[in-house]
Image (tube, coloured by chain):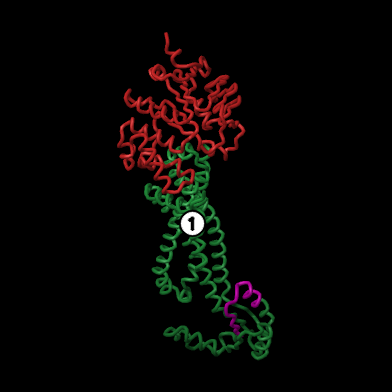
Amino acid sequence: MFRPAYFVARALDALRRGPFVTLVAVGTIFVAVFVTGLFAAALGGAARLLSAWGGEVQISVYLAPGTDPALARAAAERIAHGLAVEVVSSEEALRRLKVSLGEQASVLDGVGEKVLPASVEVRAPGISLEAAKALAASLEAVPGAEQVDFGNAWLERLELFLRRARSTGLVLFTVLSLATAVLVANTLRLAVYARRDEIEIMKLVGATDAFVSAPFLIEGLVQGLAGAALAVGALLGTQAALLPRLRAAVVLAERVTRADLLPTPLLLGLLAGGAVLGLGASALSLGRFLRKI
Amino acid sequence: MGIGIGRGAMIQLFHVFKEYPGEGAALSDVSIHVRKGEFVFVTGPSGAGKSTLLKLVFCAEPATSGQLLVFGKNVSKLRSSAVPYLRRNIGVVFQDFKLLPDRTVSENVAFPLEVRGLQTRDVRRKVVGMLRSVGLDHKLAKFPLALSGGEQQRVAVARALVNDPALLLADEPTGNLDPDRTLEVMDLLEGANARGTTVVVATHDRSLLARYTKRVIALETGKVVSDGDSIRRAAP
């Protein structure tokens, strides 16, 4: 007869009887889920920063002296169809530089008005690195174009960093998951071993493997869910504490939200992962033990 | 009694051998039959194979060769998933009681009933009735370590009998008890036998064999050396 209430009651009773093992198992799963979540949040935040940078993308096509700005603009508009295109004359470029220099603008005193090249500037909000590269290459066809710049060096460094972080993260996550699974399985095996007499007697009086296993699996599930729930709470707390500081330190981080760092699907995934970890480790340790009796 | 058991043989061994790797034969060419309703002593010195014989009967271990039938079923051909259902008709008592120290007396006795899926109300009723029959209904909320050795063994007997098993196996059930407590436990086993349960008791206590007129199977170094009643064995 299958009696869920009976098995749940037995599982909760066992958790109560073995608080130390329960705490160790919950703590192990907590650390595993928390570290995983922290890493995912860091990657999510970095990706959001990258896309925030993408919102600022501006491709500058610097023109050779004597180039007809109207001709260059028309060509740029054809190439960057639908994007905002603006001609910046040499004089305007110098004025903008002076504004950006502020009090140090006096260093430009005596500099000729034509010292900076005229340019055509294309604003491409939310564009990816690959698209920016392709657009920049196309804009080299603008008549009189001498150089095309879109801050690619820094963007490429950021993308490379993110790519490496993702690869490293994947390796770390895999290693961490395996280590955690082994650690949790060993912890739960201790729990099973501590109750070997109970299991032996249950089997002696005619308990099936399913009857013996059910409470242990429920315990694993409860421990996994508890560890993961604590980790999710800690992640949310950490995010709430650190995000304002990140926003204060990095201007682009103003657009980063809780949903970027810890999206709900990630949190649900972490909860499910913790539950599966507890359940799987419990089943693994119990299976080995039952075969011995 | 759950399982369909007709009149006749309860346990049948045909040329059974049991060997442990590196230790030689624990049982060697053992052929015995125990009929339904019998009370049998299995005796012999330490290492004679008494406990091994009982382990084979309740499927804790497989025989190396030979045929073993319990309730008419060939246990070597039983699927492992069927073993629990066979065990539900066998009560087992050990010398060291095998009670869970962190469970109360009533919780220990309730185990076989819970395994069978009985409702809590029925479990309670049967446990109280069983403990009353072994004279311990006033101690059902105690923990085993708060009881004397004799009382603990009575709890173990209560757990073995609470399912009303067709067969009761007792491995040195009085080995840890003084003479008075020994008689109390033996009375419980005799009582169960009188109510129809087949009882097999492994013991090396010769005073028991002299006191109770029962069939005695004697083992030495894994072989059956005699099979008869205890009066004849006890006679000079």
Q: In the rendered structure, the residue with mark 1 lies on which chain?
A: A
**Residue type, mark 1 in image:** Gly
Q: Residue A162: x, y in percent?
A: 54, 65
Helix, strand or loop under label 1: helix
| Residue toward you, B222 or A269 | B222
The answer to whether residue A293 is seen in the rendering is: no
A28 w.r.t. B222: above or below = below
Residue under the image location 51 percent in, 53 percent down: A177
A12 w.r.t. A137: above or below = above
| Residue toward you, A234 or B81 | B81
* Number of numbered discs: 1
- Specify start and end residues of the magenta stretch as a single range: A120-136
Residue under the image location 50 percent in, 64 percent down: A268
Q: Residue B125: x, y in percent?
A: 40, 44
Q: Which residue is tagged 1?
A: A274
Chain with colour green in the figure: A
Q: Quadrant of residue A158?
A: bottom right
Chain with colour red in the figure: B
| Residue toward you, A205 or A239 | A205
